[in-house]
Amino acid sequence: MYCDAWRHARVGIRTEFLPNGRRMSYKGLNDSHRRRALVPFLAAADMIPGMCVSLAVSKSVGTLFRRDASPINPALTDCLTWSESLFERVLRIVHVVSFWIAGISRPNQDVLWFSDEDEIASNPETLKLLTKVWANVMNNYTVHPLRHLKCGTTKCDDGSNSIEDFAAIPDLVAGGLSDLLTAINGRYQVGLVLPFGGTCKAKAQVIGHWLSQQKGVLQKVVLVIDKDASGLTITRLNFSDCSPSCS
C-alpha cells in the first residue's frame, strides 16, 4: 500500500509518545506527551505520497460567497439555514478542495474526504448536506468523471487512530500557519524574506521549520489570498528554516 511507511511510523510514535490514545492537535500541544511527539509525528507525515495544501485567507478579503448573491441549486436550499459565517466557511473549503481534486485526480477515481467533527460536519445531517454541496460544486470543476465521492469525520475511526492521525496533520499545519502569519502581520511581498523573530510561538516555529523541508515524498504548498487596490491576490509562501519568502 502507498501509505504503509507512514502507517508503520505512526504506530511506533503512538507506542512511544502518545499513551492512552491521545489525539494530536495544535491546541493540545500544551500537553508534554504531544509536544514530544510533534517532531517525529511531522517527520512521519513526510512519508505520505501526496500533497499538503494550505490556504490562508486574509481578514481584509471579507466575504467570497455572499448568501444573497451566490447562486444556489434548488436541491441545496437547506444550506441557506446556515449562518453567514458557516455558509462562507463551507463554500471556501468546498471550492478549494474541488479545485485541487480536479487538478490531481484521475478518471473514475474514488475520493474520500475526512474532516474533524467541527461546525461543518458536527452531526449526520450537517455531514449529509456538506456531501451534497461538495458533489454539486465538484461537478463544476472536474473535466473527467469520478466514481464515488464520500465524506466522513474522525468519528469513523476504528479505534486505531489512523483517521484521527491523518486529520491531525492539516490541523497542526493550520494552527501553526495562523500563528506564523500573525507573527509577520501581513508583511510579505514577492521576493521578500522575513524572519519571524521572538514573538512567534515555539510550536508554530517547529511547524514552520517542517514546512521548509521538502525531504520526503509529501509535497507542501502554502497559499495566501489577500486584497490590495487592484483586487484579490494569491501569493505562494515558501519557508526557509521557518522564515517565509514569497513567490
Image (cartoon, grey):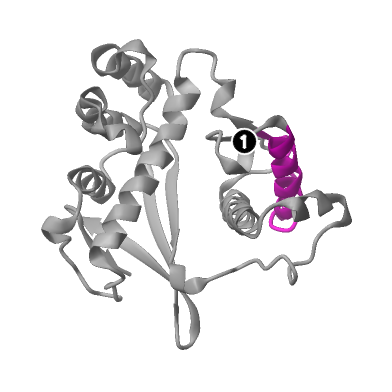
Q: Is residue 139 visible?
A: no
Question: What segment is highlighted magenta in the picture?
Answer: 125-151
Q: Amino acid at mark 1?
A: Ser
Q: Nearer the viewer, residue 93 or 140?
A: 93
Q: Residue sitting at 18 percent across and 67 percent down?
A: 194
| Residue 80 position by quadrant | bottom right
Where is residue 68? Give x, y as percent: 75, 69
In this picture, is 18 found above or below 205? above
In this picture, is 131 found above or below 74? above
Q: Residue sitting at 27 percent across and 33 percent down?
A: 29
Where is residue 125? Give x, y as percent: 74, 35
Q: Nearer the viewer, residue 164 or 135?
A: 164
Q: Residue furthest right?
A: 74
Q: Quadrant of the C terminus?
A: bottom left
Inspect the magenta stretch and tell me whether residue 161 lies in it: no
Drawn side of residue 237 relative to residue 156, left or right: left
Drawn side of residue 120 relative to residue 168, left or right: right
Where is residue 88? Give x, y as percent: 62, 59
Q: Residue sitting at 30 percent across and 60 percent down?
A: 181
Q: Secondary structure at mark 1?
A: loop
Label 1 sits on residue: 122
Q: Nearer the viewer, residue 87 or 148?
A: 87
Q: Is residue 219 visible?
A: yes
Where is residue 105? Give x, y as percent: 60, 45
